[in-house]
Amino acid sequence: MLDLQAIRQDFPILHQEVNGQPLVYLDNAASSQKPVQVIDAIADYYRKDNANVHRGVHRLSQRATDAYEASREKVRNFVNAQSDKEVVFVRGATEAINLVAQSFVRPNLNAGDEILISHMEHHANIVPWQMLCEQTGAKLNVIPMNLEGELDLSTFDELLTDKTKVLAVGHVSNALGTVNPIKDMISKAHSKDIPVLIDGAQAVPHMEVDVQDLDCDFYVFSGHKMFAPTGIGALYGKQDLLEAMPPWQGGGDMILSVSFEHTQYNELPYKFEAGTPHIAGAIGLGAAIDYMQDLGITNLANHEHDLLVAATEKVSAMDGVRIIGTAKEKASVLSFMIEGVHPHDVGTIFDQQGVAIRTGHHCAQPVMQFFGIPATARASFAFYNTMEEVDALVLGIKKVQELFA
Amino acid sequence: MSSADLRDLYQQVIMDHNKKPRNFHDMDDANHFAHGNNPLCGDALVVYVKLNDDVIEDVSFQGSGCAISVASASLMTEALKGKTVAEAEHIYQQVHKQMTGDEFDATALGKLEVLSGVKEFPARVKCATLSWHTMHTAMDNDHDVSVTTE
């Protein structure tokens, strides 16, 4: 069992009023809040250890390097990668996907080749592939979905063709909360020698991830959705694939030697980390991983599951409310429509009650088009949310219905 | 609890115009029209204007959006019908001033003053101004154009 009261004490931002009401933060799928352990780790780094990494022989540079690399080891452990060499620090999931698109897929991509994604991807897992298709003449194929918001895998085998050069799919949908059956999908793709990238941005805050068990080729995520700072994230890639890939960006830190005739690139993972990295961010990410692991990721997941089940039951029982995304396997997210009320109005009325939810297309416009709606209202839970906050969600919906009656 | 503020925003007139938008149809003989989009929230509308010399003989809109954007568009069509281009321009300017908290000419606005509650909700100002920007663009052009606010 989680000691929620103690946990909430770790999140200073939660203890404030918004529009005269206690803040109820239910926009965790957009960005999560940070515990004081993460905030302190960042502040301590700047107070005591700040220097550039992998360079100076002086003490501060050594301490900064040690802390930065210790975080890499934490990320390795967090996703159970085999080696630190398989963990590349990036700005976030978006940058990681662009890196893989340009450095792994593009060199082997010809006109007429295919890239396979799904209908429920975040724009970050659509647009980089579209750009790649424009650059090469390759074709973007899309795995369809059904009205529950689950992937329709009835044609999956046919979509995996001998021209498919990569399968890129989200672990958990940010707009619907659907948990996709990625292990089976990876296995099927691999049976046809198709490499797989998993967008784990919405998964890592909510569940244990084991990249060796999944056997994915690439796994990407952002720190800020898992209680770490913005501007930091990680790319996991299988070592042999990363070794074979050309660098993505050039600059300092990614080289062993440079002359005007020839540059010898650095070894993994530094080959992909050009320029001074977001050292404080990486340290914050390490602190967030420590925090989650101390509490026990399974414990966090169980509590969130209870919140989602309770919220789903209560909201389903209300007249005039439609839940968008009713997959059997879901994590954290409850998207909904209130009959006769635009989600944007819902968001404003919630905000007046101190309840922060997201309203809009959630950077997943194809999902909105599929359901024939311009937007949804979305409540998304983190482990620091309470059953009382689920009730605040229900009250918020009632308030909207009263006002628009 | 700030229900009072919410009632300032969602006044009865606004709720009424949202439920039953006036002049809510396309217009075959419009000589000016434009598309307006707010990609952030998915509001999308078309404003049609029929200008006869200097006078707005007819104005209508079509589309979908939140209560504020629909009501604002509906109120706009009521307010502009029969006005000259110069009068419409003046009203357009006053609506903007009202929503950004500047001093404005209340007599020119009349019923449009119900939109004043929007200024307390900065995230919603663009909802209220979408139709006005779209109308303004339509008047400036004699072909289909698009306006985007975000």
Image (cartoon, rainbow, N blue to C red):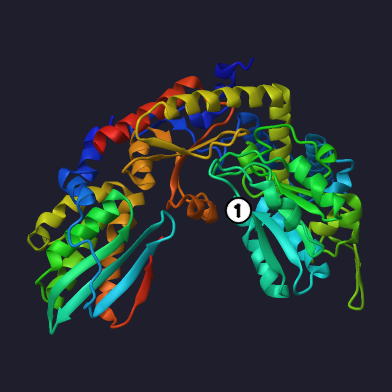
Q: Quadrant of residue A28?
A: top right
The type of residue carrying mark 1 is: His
Few, some or many residues within 10 Å of mark 1 (<14, 14–19, 20+): many
Which x, y percent locates residue A304?
Answer: 59, 26
Residue carrying label 1: A119
Say which residue appears at 11% left-offset and 55% top-offset. B111
- Marks counted in the figure total 1
Left or right for A193, reference B139:
right
Say which residue appears at 66% left-offset and 44% top-offset. A201
Say which residue appears at 31% left-offset and 73% top-offset. B34
Left or right for A333, reference A169:
left
Which x, y percent locates residue A280?
Answer: 70, 44
Which x, y percent locates residue A37?
Answer: 65, 30
In this view, B58 is above or below A184: below
- Furthest-left residue in view? B107
Nearer the observer, B20 or A32: B20
At numbered mark 1, what does the secondary structure look like: helix, strand or loop? Answer: loop
